[in-house]
Amino acid sequence: MEVLERLTPYVELVHLLLNTNFTYLTRKLAPSDSLDRARIPSAVAKSYDEVLFSGVLFDCVPGIPCEIKTPFGICFTALALWKGDGFVLIGPYLPERADGAQLEEILASQGVPLGLKEQYSVYYRDLPTLSRGKVRAALGVLAAGVYGESLASSAFSSRDISPEDPSPCPVFEEDSMQVRADAIARRYEGERRLMEAVARGDMRAADMVEETTLRLERVPNKLRNRKNLFIVLNTLMRKAVEAAQVHPFYIDAISAKWAMRIEAVEQEADLYPMRREIVEDYCRLAQTRSMASYSPNVRSMLTYVQFNLAESISLEAIARQLGVNASYLSSQFNREVGKSLPEYVSEKRIAEAKRLLRGRAQLPIGQIAAAVGFSDVNYFTKVFKKKAGQTPSAYRAAQRALAAEQKEI
């Protein structure tokens, strides 16, 4: 089994317990993942590269955690793995919280303009503060679980990165860039497959999200960052159903719903169940509203019917609007939909009437009839009974009885 596969269960463990990153590096210092550099001040990011690629990790002894401190006072703890398997790295984190004066002193020592203090303050504020005991405990669980080894009793080495340390090795850096490029390519491929599955309305896509968007979750485990990742998922799903030719009206409604629900979450744990719900919701939308299999003319006709059920709908009016011969349009609709336009409209009106009858509001039958395009309530009742096998009132009573029975169960 690959080393990374054996270490994977500990990635989320570190995120949840220590609120920071867990990175595996090969003996050639190729990392399993990369830090979210979009939110790291550039000078700090450069100091992280000195930890990752300068070769300082080769000073670590298997079984002894080594705390590495950057010139910015930010720490990582490395552990050289047994059997020459490479290294694991926990961090970034702070050994203790820095106050404003200490931060100014650090920035001045590194030649960072004090005008950038606010940017750095925000980044430092989001870093977790960890004791050696907590980090050691996490690495001890890993050592026992993966290698059946124990960490050296109470040992904990330390190393400060200084400007005199060697520059990153070009070979190592080149290898790591290839690994990062391959990881990004795999992520994009996974997202493509996920979006294609959602566009098909394939509910198995809910399982695929574990392999794709979750790989973005390699940032400090803050609620805001997690919310941002779910916003990314919501956007991917929206693009997926756009490709399925779902009308923007329906896409906007579901996208706005999830955007509000994501923002309303106050506890990180409450986000995780939403992951599957979001994907399945968009799959259902694709199943019920996709028009990808129809020609542009027929899509336009279907859309017109969807939004004009309460109005008079005629083939001639739609044909004029589209600038197409009515006879040709009728033939095209019959061929693609498998029924005539009047028959399709009648089915959609009765389906919408059923939905309104199942609703909580006790809308009068005449009002429901008007809402779905019937000016004569008696004619509506006649058509409804023919299609549904019972009158609108009987249908409503039966649905309410069924709902009450299910509620009791």
Image: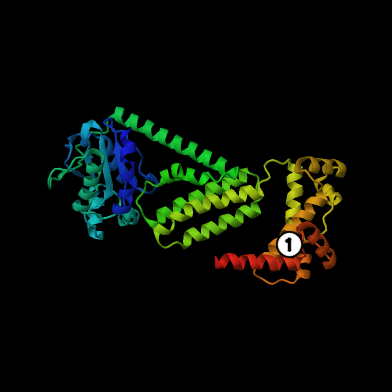
The secondary structure type at the circle numbered 1 is: helix
Instruction: Name the amino acid, label 1.
Output: Ala
Local crowd size for mark 1, using a 10 Å CA cut-off: few (<14), some (14–19), many (≥20): many
Residue 308 appearing in the image: no
Q: Is residue 155 left or right of residue 339?
A: left
The x, y position of residue 154, in whole percent, is 12, 48
Give residue 391's position: percent from left, percent from top.
77, 65
Q: Residue sitting at 77 percent across and 59 percent down? A: 389
Q: Position of residue 186 (x, y in %)?
A: 45, 35
Quarter location, residue 47:
top left
Q: Residue at x 29, y 42 (%)?
A: 48
Whether residue 119 is visible to the viewer of this picture, yes or no, is: yes
Q: Which residue is mark 1?
A: 353
Residue lying farthest to the top in this orientation? 171
The total number of labels drawn is 1
Residue 148 rendering spot, x and y as whole percentages: 21, 40
**Quadrant of the frame with the C terminus:** bottom right
| Whether residue 97 is situated above or below residue 184 in the rendered picture | below
Tell which of 17 and 400 is nearer to you: 400
The residue at 60%/68% (across/down) is 404
What's the colour scheme? rainbow
Q: Residue at x 49, y 49 (%)?
A: 232
**Quadrant where the N terminus lies?**
top left
The image quarter containing residue 256 is bottom right
